[in-house]
Amino acid sequence: MDKQRFELGLAQRKATLGAEYVEKNLAAADEFTLPFQEAMTEWCWGFGWGDDAIDAKTRSMMNLTMIGALGKMHEWELHCRGALNNGVSKQEIRAIVHTIAIYCGVPQGLECFRVARKVLEEAGEL
């Protein structure tokens, strides 16, 4: 493991998803899941998110679109919260969901709206 990339990833992961969430996941990891948590933190968050060619807000918007297209709604909810942390507005989330509905189908757009409403209500945005 590249310790420097891991630390960069850990900082970005906490900034986006919240320190409490990240620390809870790492604390819950055991010998079976810890290698994945470490690799994901280093690779996804350190290598991917650590590349400053794309700012965190834009990266969050890209992630919402891709995760929504894949229909991975648990992750979409998590990244919707993270997108708010990275400065994505309610109007931008709505536009992202419109794009998902256009290219991935109305049922998937409806599912994203359902989850976005939950996240936005919890954040006091609705």
Image (cartoon, rainbow, N blue to C red):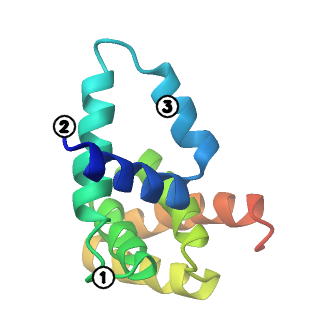
Q: Amino acid at mark 2?
A: Met
CA gap, disc 1 to disc 3? 26 Å
Look at 30% across and 35% down and name the residue there: 38
Query: Is residue 105 positioned above or below 77 on the image?
Result: below
| Residue with the most extreme top position | 31
| Foreground pick, 82 / 10 | 10
Q: Which residue is mark 1?
A: 54
Number of the label disc, if any, that sits on residue 25: 3
State how far apart marks 3 and 2 are (Cα).
19 Å
Identified by mark 3, the residue type is Asn
- Residue assigned mark 2: 1
**Disc 1 residue crowd, few under 14, some 14–19, many 20+, Cα 10 Å:** few
Residue 47 position (above or below residue 27): below
Q: CA distance from mark 1 to mark 2?
A: 24 Å
Classify the position of the N terminus by image quarter: top left
Drawn side of residue 40 relative to residue 96, left or right: left
The mark nearer the N terminus, 1 or 3, is 3
